[in-house]
Structures are given as structure tokens and as C-alpha cells.
Amino acid sequence: MEEKKIPYKIYLNESEIPTKWYNMRADMKNKPAPLLNPGTLEPMTAEELAPVFCDELVKQELNDTDAYIDIPEEIQKFYKMYRPSPLIRAYFLEKALDTPAKIYYKFEGNNTSGSHKLNSAIAQAYYAKKQGLKGVTTETGAGQWGTALSMACSYFGIDCKVYMVKVSYEQKPFRREVMRTYGASVTPSPSNTTNVGKKILAEHPGTTGSLGCAISEAVEVATTTEGYRYVLGSVLNQVLLHQSVIGLETKTAMDKYGIKPDIIIGCAGGGSNLGGLISPFMGEKLRGEADYRIIAVEPASCPSFTRGKFAYDFCDTGMVCPLAKMYTLGSGFIPSANHAGGLRYHGMSSTLSQLYHDGLMEATSVEQTSVFDAAEQFARVEGILPAPESSHAIRVAIDEALKCKETGEEKTILFGLTGTGYFDMVAYEKYNDGVMTDYIPSDADLEKGFAGLPKVDL
């Protein structure tokens, strides 16, 4: 098909919004290792997970066999409020880079939460409401997940308690206030409101917090408060399942115009955006139907894939959650407070970790000053102020496009633009003022986290 016939923005029809989620695990030859009970080191059963998660979400978490799972009608109706999201040809970026590469991005920021997180938040709130719960608890790092969940809980009329990583709570007051506007209570983590929070504060006075800390607090509250369950915005299998709408829409749009990406790039913190974007493409790769080069991009300050260990580890700093086999820096690892974006989790999705371990995808890490350089370059030509998280993918997409300029190859690059950066202006201010610095943990720093890995012999 002639290039001139490909529009700047490719929109699907409302009828083309997915009606089923795609479960990559069904097509994986090597399934992700099971969650383990931290006491017995035996695989967690549905009965053991039920006090923590909603019943239907437990089923989705443990489902390794069904390739497609129906999206309930009420969730489909909600999706129509902001989906389908556009697939955009980055013509202006291509021109600015003077590259023969064709660059596309899937933009997930066209909803009030400003990110892709709403795709899973509405599903998890729906199942909590359907189960008759009073409310849910959760953690949030940069705030996108907490914002999305507060919106979803407000829609279904259930309570939402958010534990927000302390450094983000202080740096992003407006994100916090959006959550409160939608009715959520927001607590900086670690806090004195939970036993595990008090313990972490005693052991690490003055800590700026981490997602692992916030998870511990949210789980404690959920399991000790009647009528509540815990929900998570990334990492879990169920979340990657819900986020598959991103990739399914992307592939449908590309197929309409005969476009096949050579390189697919996504930022990676816990794995929700990356897993959702790559899902149908990885499915083809797993089934031997097509091949793609898939790149996960993470911050150099929290390099789970590129410098972590593939091992069983606690999902939280307080060590109250199940153990997951994943690429991890150790549950005690706390990223530097100068890191300006999200992507702060010490580990990575078990599903993505297995795919990476099996050589089905690549990973790279980038420093934050180069990330913000790419963010501003993108904003000035494409007209969207990107979230710092998304900008990790933008950085590598630009780098790959410049390689094409050097070699003359006309590769097609696809990346995920997870959301907007309008609540991240403190970080942009630091970059523009020239006071933003890069932090890369030393091997000695990482060894402290690895030393706390549980001894699991399986």
C-alpha cells in the first residue's frame, strides 16, 4: 500500500474495540512459574489468594490455558467512553530525525487519568463491585494507577484507599488531588497507619518509599479490613490480560493498512504497558506465525531486567505477599529519590520475565536526562507532552530511527505512548533548569538487594 494513503491518525470504529482479552500465557511453551506461599513455598491456590484478590481476578491470575477471555458487557461499555485510542504515524518526528524509518505510536493518554492504567482499573473495580465488596486498596508510584483506580471506583460507587510512594506524593500534589477529587483517600507510603509501614520506617528512617513498601501497606489494610480486597496496577498476570486491549487495537489498525512493525518498543516498570502492547504480536511469535524484535526499556536507576536476577522474590518490601519468580533487584531495593518518573518497581512481571529469559524479547536501560531530552524533542514536533515513563520508549525509538538513518534501512518502529506528562512538571522543571542528575546503582548497591532474596530450591 502506498505510504500516502496511511493517515496521520488511524482510528478504529467503535465496533472494533476488543470484546475479548488475549492471554499470552496460553501460547507460551514455558509457562510463568507459579506464585508461592511464603510460608510453605508451595504454589498458591485459589483459596489462599481469595482473601487478597477478588474471586474472578484470582481465576484470571491462575489461568494459563484460555487464550481469550470475554470482556464483560459493562466493561465494554465503559471502554467506549475513551476507546478505541488512536494509532499515530509520527510523520513530524520522522522528518525532524531525517530518518527513513516509519514510526508509529499507540497513544493511551486520551482519558482523564492520562494513561493506559484505566484499562485494568475499570475491570478490577467491576469485579470488586460484582462481588459485593465495600472497597479496594492499592499502591501507586507516579500516580497514574491511583488516579485510574479512583475514577473506576467512583464509577461503581465503591471505596478506594491508595498508598502513594512518598517521594511521588510530595513531588506530584496535583496527581494526588485528582485522586481525592474522585473520592479516594491517599496516604504517603511508608506511613504510620499500618504495622508494616511502622516497621519499614523504623528500619529506614527518612526513606522516600518504593512501590514495594506501598504494596505491603495496601495488602495489610485489605486483609485486615472486612469487605475489602487488594488490587494492583501492574506485574500480575490479570493486569497484562486486561491491558491486551492496547495491542489488540494496535494490531487491528496496522492490519487495516498492511503495516507490519519490525521493532516494538515499550517502557517497563512492572510490565502492564509493555505486556499489553506486545500481546498479539508476541502471540504470533510464540505460535511461529511471525517474528518481531521486541524491546523493553527501563530506567538505569531501577534496572530489573538488565541487571536483576531471575529468581523467586517477595512482591513487596514488607514480605507479606506471595513469592513470584521474576527478574528482580530484591524486595528491599529502593530506587533513588531523584528518579523523576514511575517505573520504580523492584521486580518485573513473571510472564514478561519468562519471555525475556527465553530470549523472545530484549531489554535495555536508559538514563533519565537522556529520557527527558527525548521527551522534549518529541513534544516539540508531535504536539503531545509525554509522561516520563513513556519517554523511556521514545528515547529508544529515536535511537533506533537514527540507526536506520545511518544504515539507510526503512524499518517500521512501533512504540507505546502510555500517557501524558502534565502532572510531571516538577521533573520537567528540573530538566529545563539543568539540575536533573542521573543515578545508576553500583554493583555494591544491587548486592544489598540480592542478599535479601529468599532461599527457594525448586
Image: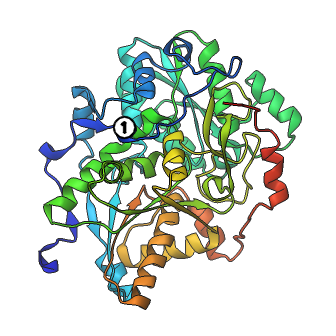
- Looking at the picture, tell me which residue is in the foreground, 360 or 60: 360
The residue positioned 25% from the left and 66% from the top of the image is 260
Which residue position is annotated with label 1?
Answer: 242
Give the SS element for disc 1. Answer: helix
Q: Residues within 10 Å of mark 1 (few under 14, many from 20)?
A: many
**Residue 119 appears in the picture as rendered:** no
Q: Amino acid at mark 1?
A: His
- Looking at the picture, tell me which residue is in the foreground, 166 or 312: 312
State whether residue 68 is above or below residue 287.
above
Percent across and percent down for residue 330 are: 73, 43
Percent across and percent down for residue 393 are: 48, 64
Relative to 249, 170 lies left or right:
right
Relative to 411, 4 lies left or right:
left
**Image quadrant of residue 262?**
bottom left
Relative to 79, 60 lies left or right:
right
Q: Quadrant of the C terminus?
A: top right
